Image (cartoon, grey):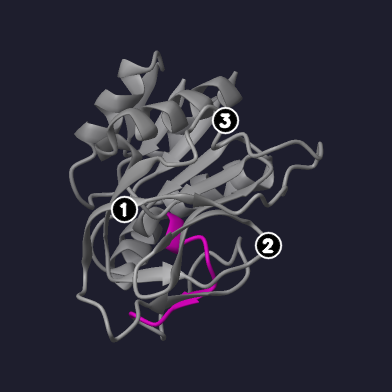
Amino acid sequence: MIAVLDYGIGNLRSAEKALVHVGADVRLVSEPSAARGAAGMVLPGVGAFGACVRALRSSGLMEVAMGALETDTPFLGICVGLQMLYEASDEEPAEAGMGVLKGKVRSLSPGVKRPQMQWNLLHPTNAVPMASGGASALLAGVADDAWAYFVHSYAPEPTEDVVATCDYGGSVVAAVERGNLWGTQFHPEKSGRTGLAILENFVRRCG
């Protein structure tokens, strides 16, 4: 079972349906006890960083997410769900993130229209963050000229965990991977063939 954390932010049905489409047994989880025994966990997020962090904490699902990360359960953060994994965000500096990934979330370049609300081309970084020394499992089977759908005004600053970027007023972090911890700044559930391939890779990782 893959648990999609439902902490009262946004519509999770599209993520749920996309995961079901690629063969996952999915459960929308709003109570911590319902996530017990999950083989994988998905943390979506839309809207503002601070509001999402506060909602996740007040729902009791912050501890669930941290527990999954501490036990190396396959974990996928999507959009603001990825951003919350970092230490902080320019969007609300006073609100701390989960701090699982080092670094901060920064505003997109002032020279571009915000939010970035469009399809954009992914650029694999050829980073190898896997403990096994293999290629990115998140991007397995994804073409080098793959397109993904973005809706965001902020993005993580680049670190060694980055496995894909896009170009929007400069290089912007699009996907990160560190072992069983995966994250996409774009929305895989809205990214057609590219997104479905990534979700299928995640389901396979959950095993």
Mainly helix, strand or loop, the magenta region? loop
Secondary structure of the residue carrying tag 2 is: loop
Q: Is residue 135 magenta?
A: no
- Tell me whether the residue at label 1 lies in contact with that at label 2, contact meaning CB atoms closer than 8 angstroms: no
Rendered position, 133 above or below 9 = above
Residue 162 located left or right of residue 151: right
Which residue is label 2 attached to?
A: 160
Query: Which of the labelled discs sits on residue 85, or is there none?
Result: none
Disc 1 from disc 3: Cα separation: 19 Å
Residue numbers of the magenta segment: 82-91
Task: Say whether disc 3 or disc 2 marks the residue closer to the N-terminus.
Answer: 3
Which residue is label 1 attached to?
A: 120
Residue 26 at x, y = what percent?
37, 22
**What residue type is disc 3 on?**
Ala
Of 43 and 106, which appears nearest the observer? 106
Disc 3 from disc 2: Cα separation: 18 Å
Task: Say whether disc 1 or disc 3 marks the residue closer to the N-terminus.
Answer: 1
Residue at figure coordinates x 33%, y 28% from the top left: 193
Task: Say whether disc 1 or disc 2 marks the residue closer to the N-terminus.
Answer: 1
- Tell me the mark number nearer the camera, choosing from 3 and 2: 3
Rendered position, 78 above or below 84 = above
Query: Which of the labelled discs sits on residue 140, or is there none?
Result: 3
**What residue type is disc 1 on?**
Asn
Q: How many marks?
A: 3
Residue at figure coordinates x 35%, y 71% from the top left: 154
